[in-house]
Image (cartoon, rainbow, N blue to C red):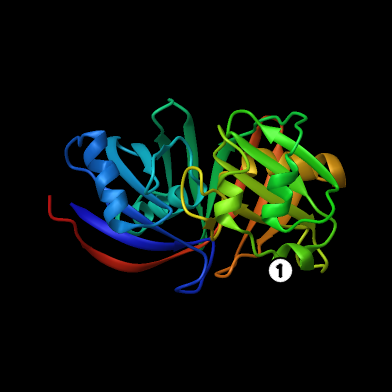
Amino acid sequence: MKTYFVDSFTNEKFKGNPAAVCLLERELESKTMQNIAIEIGFSETAFIKQISDNIYSIRFFSPKTEIPLCGHATLASSKIIFDTTLLQNIKFINYENVELFIEKVGNKIKMQFPVYDTEEIEVPLKMTEALGISEIVNKRYSPKNKIILIEIKSATELADLKPDFTALLNSHTGINGVLVTAVSDNETFDFHYRYFWPWAGTNEDPVTGGIQTFLTKYWAEKLNKTKFNAYQSSLRTGTMSTELLDDKIFILGEAVTVLKGEFVL
């Protein structure tokens, strides 16, 4: 099985978020795909299979479980298809039958994702203590993604967070992760964020595109604008541009291929 490693949401190797992209020529059992994701160890491994012309099925697996939607692995998969075919636009269909429309725009890739609402939630004190947060500006919850959103006042504080992941994991149940965000402290970006998800994946995701399904709308309502430059202040760092348009979110990013090989099945 042809397999690629791609660094997403960056134009530099060893930055951004690494994803594995596996090109399926036949169907694989879910258990086999899960084992491959465990073997590779990235936050996500994408399995794509051509259905017809420019339409592909796509499934995402973390080392712990299958994930319905993943931005950086979608970007990585798109990068491989655009680099190995003459296609300029493609459509992915995930296992929930959500359609993801992807377009090549120069050196960048533009992805269309759905938009999800958030609702009020109470955040346990144990969670904020585990994260190292002293003051919360706002808190929301994305039921569709099962992710808690916490806004804090400082992008510097956000970058300096050093969570206790054992305590964080024990602070809540029934969620996939917690997203911490803050308004940017420089003119290059509109907001910063980090994503912690020891419940369903790795301790911290280096760069996360899927959370823009609700994070961009959150900041659109706060900042009264629809176009953004976002910065993920993880150790590897990563950037992307987003735009909210009605019930759609557009994510624009770059990716770099770092490895080509074959997985022996």
> What is the x, y in percent for residue 96?
43, 26
Task: Inspect the image, locate mark 1, and give the three-letter code of the amino acid beneath it.
Answer: Asp
Pointer 1 residue: 160
Query: Would residue 78 be found to the left or right of residue 107 on screen?
Result: left
Q: Position of residue 143 (x, y in %)?
A: 63, 28
| Relative vertical location of residue 74 with respect to residue 165 in this rendering, above or below | above
Viewed as shown, does residue 81 lie left or right of 69?
left
Measuring from the top left, give residue 147's x and y in whole percent.
Answer: 62, 38
Tell me residue 247's x, y (percent). Answer: 67, 30
Tell me: 234 left or right of 153. left
Residue positioned 21% across, 34% down in the render: 29
Disc 1 on helix, strand or loop?
A: helix
Q: Is residue 49 left or right of residue 172?
A: left
Q: Residue at x 46, y 48 (%)?
A: 201
Against 148, residue 97 (above or below) is above
For the point 31% across and 42% down, which residue is it? 48
Nearest the viewer among 246 and 3 is 3
